[in-house]
Amino acid sequence: MSAIYKVSYVVTGNDHPGAIVNVATPPKVGDVVELGRSTYRVTEVIDLIPPRGEFHYLHATLAPAVG
């Protein structure tokens, strides 16, 4: 079975509430993420806890993407 990354996205720089999303590949600093109608750039990624089976738990900080 493939890994599942449960990512807690927290947005800085505006009032977006963030999201918790399951993704197939882990986010990396510099990646662009769409939440709803807005586009953000990943500025930080942290492992929250060690993986449990195929589940990996991550926190990613996002900032509004410019241009």
Image (cartoon, grey):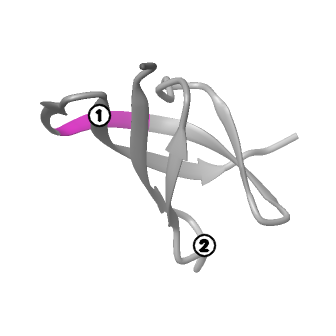
Residues shaded magenta: 44-48
Vertical side of 39 occupied by 43: above or below: above
Which quadrant is home to the C terminus? Answer: top right
Residue 28, image x, y percentages? 49, 23
Label 1: which residue? 56
Give the residue displayed 40% in from the left and 24% down from the top: 3
Assign the N terminus to one quadrant of the image. top left
* Residue drawn 48% across the image and 37% down it: 43
Classify residue 14 by image quadrant: bottom right
* Prevalent SS, magenta region: strand
Tell whether position 9 is magenta. no
Is residue 9 left or right of 47 when viewed as pictured?
Answer: right
Category of crowding for the residue at label 2, using alpha-carbon neighbours closer than 10 angstroms: few (below 14), some (14–19), many (at least 20): few
Quick one: label 1, few (<14), some, or many (20+) residues within 10 Å? Answer: some
Dot 2 amino acid type: Asn
Q: Nearer the viewer, mark 2 or mark 1?
A: 1
Residue 57 in picture, x, y percent from top left: 28, 41
Residue at (58, 80) in percent of width and height: 15
36 to the left or right of 53: right
Label 2 or label 1, whichever comes before in sequence order: 2
Q: Residue furthest front?
A: 1
Q: Amino acid at mark 1?
A: His
Q: Alpha carbon of mark 2 to alpha carbon of mark 1: how far? A: 27 Å
Q: Is residue 46 magenta?
A: yes
Q: In this orientation, which residue lies closer to the viewer: 54 or 16? A: 54
